[in-house]
Image (cartoon, rainbow, N blue to C red):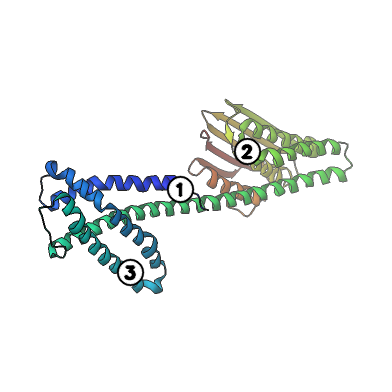
Amino acid sequence: MARLNWTRIALHVIFWLVYLPINAVVSCILQGAHIEKEFGMALVGETFSLPLKLAFTYFVFYYVIPLYLERSKIWQLIGLLLAAFIVATILYRIEIGWLFFPAFYPDRVINILSFNGLLLTIFDLFITLAAAVAIKMIRMHYKSLEFEQQLIREKLQSELNFLRAQTNPHFLFNTLNNLYVLARKKSEKTPEAIMMLSKIMRFVIYECRAPRIALGDEAQVIQDFIELEKLRYNTRLVVNYREDIDYPLTPVAPLLLLPFVENSFKHGASGTTGDVHIDISLSLHNRELIFTVKNTVDKEQRPPSPSGSGIGLQNLKRQLDLLYPEQYELSTVRENGHFLARLRLHLEED
């Protein structure tokens, strides 16, 4: 058995409670009566006719209107709507002429089929139905917008999950290449590198499941990755890392900064044959994050760009668009044998 939607029932009750006094005032105006004197009796009359209006309105709502969804039954819809108006009008007039007036105005006799009376009754029913339908249409419109927004959010979240799913294998692939080089050299640093990789992967797999992590944790995994890369390149690689964070617990999307660092090693250390210098700077003040990565590149080497074909920066830019729309500035510049990537990001409180 379906559970009752008490919120929906309460909203319907509120509508009719608001409708009764408003329509009583309208009834006084249409009849040319003095509102202060006749409002009470008009309200009694509206309450007296309320059951018929309820039956008429909900019949149209839940039986007639749904037929409109089936375009092949449009004439059936029109026919039912006209029949509902005719039956409701006749019953309304009978109710007024045979029940209401004999009970409250026994000295008055009315013609239930008078033209003016029928016209006022039809107008009364039309206003009642129009008000109810208007509110229902507005509610359906907002529900449709809410549903559309929900679909958009789910689509964006699915895309974000896909991008993050790409990031992890991409990171693992690059790091395993480093271990492969160390293993081929039969380096004594291989076990240490495996332990560092294990630490980083534990962070990537488990802690990065949350939508936000502390910026201090992101900074720590960057430092671990730098130490892992140093094992491979020895003295040929010089890395300068600077950090100035006023509040390390500031929430940030996980693995948002690491692709910059990966990119600098891939196109700096791996892409050049001489000495390599990589400068990394991370600062956070008043929730304004500035992250810059500058690395050496060969003159003939084509630099990466956020709109390029590489997974790293292209993936990163799309994540920024989804997570921090209109909250970031990302620029990449190549000059004097160096490639510079700079991210400025405003981090809001979650």
Q: Which residue is mark 2?
A: 293
Nearest-to-viewer mark from 2 and 3? 3
Which amino acid, by three-letter code, is at mark 3?
Answer: Leu
**Snapshot quadrant of residue 124:** bottom left
Q: Residue at x 31, y 71 (%)?
A: 79
Q: Residue at x 62, y 47 (%)?
A: 313
Element under disc 2? strand
Sequence-earlier tag: 2 or 3: 3
The answer to whether 239 is drawn above or below residue 157 in the figure is above
Q: Residue at x 87, y 43 (%)?
A: 185
Quote the CA–CA distance across marks 1 and 3: 28 Å
Q: Residues within 10 Å of mark 1 (few under 14, many from 20)?
A: few
Please name whichever residue, 272 or 231, is drawn nearer the observer in this view of the structure: 231
Q: Residue at x 78, y 36 (%)?
A: 196
Element under disc 3? helix
Could you tell me residue 257's position as x and y percent? 62, 39
Please name whichever residue, 339 or 35, is drawn nearer the observer in this view of the structure: 35
Q: Which residue is mark 3?
A: 80
Q: Which residue is mark 1?
A: 5
Sequence-earlier tag: 1 or 2: 1
Which amino acid, by three-letter code, is at mark 1?
Answer: Asn
Sequence-earlier tag: 1 or 3: 1
Could you tell me residue 195's position as x and y percent? 81, 36
* Mark 2 touches mark 3? (CB < 8 Å): no
Q: Residues within 10 Å of mark 2 (few under 14, many from 20)?
A: many
